[in-house]
């Protein structure tokens, strides 16, 4: 946040972890902030903030209205501090202090209801919004993606971590390129993370290193998505993927795993869903999309239409503004 300042007033509390020495200072500063700014509504993101805000309001008079958000279906073992296991036990109690929980997909809502033993009627579904690209946001064609006759580019935008299963994609990509009569395939990998060395070695071992391009994290992802042919995401878990929404906003067909909120974004109209870890099915999906330009065009057009109808920033912001207004006026949130 210090390196990329937000375009609005903001305060950085310096939170470093729930068990760090400055936790009491963070709680004190946050409680004073509520009082000084006469805060009406506090919305949290991620589990640590739920407990920080809950604790910071315990001793306040005239407490602000609290909302919490849920944006994933568990991070998996090894991706969260050990004390988050304790958080899971406490959330059914802490949730009673919050006016509502805002989930970003129906599947996340169902996960929260089960895991946190919270009534479904207290959980709202508020889909993520995504920016529709314009010529000013896409920029020029990257040199790597200069059009070449017969080449079909697939792209994945995801952190290089185990849960995103780039290894499955690379193996499927290798299998698809060996299919007789297949188009010339290339894979663009956008993102950075601890798996990079292992994934690069896998591409070398399979003989696909010259076709698999790891370009790291990028500030202007739109510049690349505007010039590829299909977006792919093969995670073991997802809430409601922003990567999928970005693919769709660029008018791309989508190949994704059948997890989390992915089926709420992808159907046979705009893409193909495959089971987690199914290399063969993923390879078939890649070949199907690569070898049919007409199919790509139809699916891509439908992807863009879905985003325009349901996932635009205008509709997303209107929903949250209406929710804040109703809560400030003392109305109960209408969950669904």
Image (spheres, rainbow, N blue to C red):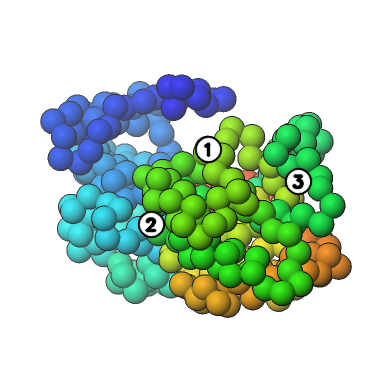
Q: Quadrant of residue 127?
A: bottom right
The residue where tag 1 is placed is 217
The residue where tag 3 is placed is 227
Residue 172 picture location, percent across and down: 55, 68
Residue at point 58%, 70% (across, down): 175
The residue where tag 2 is placed is 162
Q: Nearer the viewer, residue 144 or 121?
A: 144
Mark 2–mark 1 distance (CA, rounded to whole Å): 17 Å
**Figure check: 255 above or below 32:** below
Q: Earlier in the sequence, mark 2 or mark 3?
A: 2
Quadrant in which the C terminus is drawn? bottom right
Mark 1–mark 3 distance (CA, rounded to whole Å): 17 Å
Q: Earlier in the sequence, mark 1 or mark 3?
A: 1
Q: Is residue 94 visible?
A: no
Residue at point 60%, 48% (across, down): 210
Residue 179 picture location, percent across and down: 67, 73
């Amino acid at each position: 946040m210090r390196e990329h300042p937000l375009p609005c007033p903001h305060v950085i509390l310096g939170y470093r972890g729930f068990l760090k020495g400055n936790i009491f200072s963070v709680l004190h500063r946050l409680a004073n902030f509520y009082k000084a700014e006469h805060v009406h509504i506090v919305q949290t993101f991620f589990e640590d903030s739920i407990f920080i805000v809950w604790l910071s309001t315990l001793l306040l008079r005239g407490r602000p209205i609290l909302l919490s958000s849920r944006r994933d279906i568990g991070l998996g073992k090894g991706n969260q501090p050990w004390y988050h296991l304790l958080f899971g036990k406490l959330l059914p109690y802490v949730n009673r202090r919050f006016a509502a929980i805002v989930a970003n997909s129906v599947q996340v809502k169902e996960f929260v209801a089960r895991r946190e033993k919270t009534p479904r009627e207290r959980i709202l579904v508020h889909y993520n919004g995504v920016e529709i690209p314009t010529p000013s946001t896409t920029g020029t064609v990257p040199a790597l993606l200069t059009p070449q006759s017969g080449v079909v580019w697939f792209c994945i935008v995801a952190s290089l971590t185990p849960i995103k299963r780039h290894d499955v994609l690379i193996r499927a990509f290798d299998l698809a390129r060996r299919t007789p009569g297949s188009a010339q395939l290339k894979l663009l990998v956008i993102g950075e993370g601890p798996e990079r060395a292992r994934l690069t070695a896998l591409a070398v071992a399979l003989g696909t290193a010259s076709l698999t391009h790891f370009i790291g994290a990028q500030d202007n992802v739109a510049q690349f998505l505007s010039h590829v042919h299909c977006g792919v995401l093969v995670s073991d878990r997802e809430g409601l993927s922003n990567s999928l929404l970005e693919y769709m906003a660029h008018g791309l067909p989508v190949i994704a795993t059948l997890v989390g909120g992915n089926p709420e974004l992808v159907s046979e109209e705009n893409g193909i869903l495959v089971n987690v870890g199914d290399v063969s099915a993923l390879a078939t999906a890649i070949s199907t999309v690569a070898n049919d330009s007409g199919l790509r065009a139809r699916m891509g057009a439908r992807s863009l239409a879905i985003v325009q109808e349901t996932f635009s920033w205008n509709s997303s912001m209107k929903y949250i503004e209406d929710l804040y207004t109703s809560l400030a006026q003392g109305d109960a949130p209408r969950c669904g």
